[in-house]
Image (tube, grey):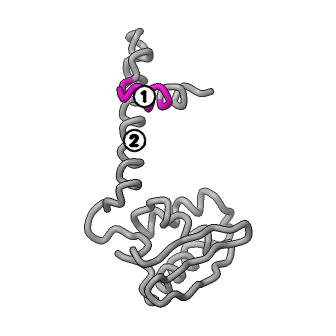
Amino acid sequence: MNRYLSLARRAWRSGEYRAKDAADADALQEDAEALRRLIRSKMEWIVERESGLQAGPGALRLSSHVRFRPETRGAFLLDTRSEKVFRLSAAGAAVAGELASGVRSEGEVVSRLKARFRDPDGALERQVRAFLDDLRAQGFLDG
């Protein structure tokens, strides 16, 4: 188990979010501080995501009346107001999955997907933005 996971698990059990062991030596002090910031940011992100709070005005997220359900070869979006179900391709599921996981901007969605998928001709960004525009037009996005 790597050091981050070990510290995160210990912090979760104890409720104390400090990397005490890493601060033993002067040489590790900077690493310890960086690790503390990383763990704190991850815990804050989890709390924000689980509580449904937004990062601010204009944050991108699925509307409250839309439910996302991933499947093995794509996903479904359910509009609870109209009770319509929309089937998404694997690519659409990747975009909606990023939104459901707490991504806050179009740029962040694009950069996370570029890190996951090859994009030799640069079409990924255009396609993602077009798909997000379609979701917005149908009322599935806030922000």
What residue span does the magenta drawing correspond to?
A: 8-18
Please indicate, yes or no, whether residue 136 appears anywhere in the rendered image.
no
Residue drawn at 40 percent across, 76 percent down? 63
Tell me residue 16's x, y (percent).
Answer: 35, 26
- CA neighbours of label 2 inside 10 A, class few (<14), some (14 to 19), many (20+): some
Front residue of 37/79: it is 79
Secondary structure beneath disc 1?
A: helix
Query: Foreground: 83 or 109?
Result: 83
Whether the residues at callouts 1 and 2 have beta carbons within 8 Å, the answer is: yes
Residue 31 shows in this picture: yes
Of 94 and 119, which appears nearest the observer?
94
Mark linked to residue 119: none
* Residue 7 belongs to magenta span: no
Residue 110 horizontal/vertical position (percent): 52, 66
- Which residue ends up furthest to the left in the rendered image? 57
- Report the predominant secondary structure element of the magenta stretch: helix
Residue 11 image label: 1
| Dot 2: element | helix
Q: Where does label 2 land, which residue? A: 43
Three-letter residue code for mark 1: Ala
Q: CA distance from mark 1 to mark 2?
A: 10 Å
Say if 133 sits above or below 73 in the image: below
Give, as a three-letter code, the residue at label 2. Met
Q: Position of residue 104 (x, y in %)?
A: 40, 63
The location of residue 59, given as percent across then percent down, is 34, 68
Quadrant for the N terminus, please: top right
The residue that appears at 51% across and 87% down in the rendered structure is 83
Q: What residue sits 44% from the left and 60% below the top?
A: 102
Q: Nearer the viewer, residue 20 or 125?
A: 20
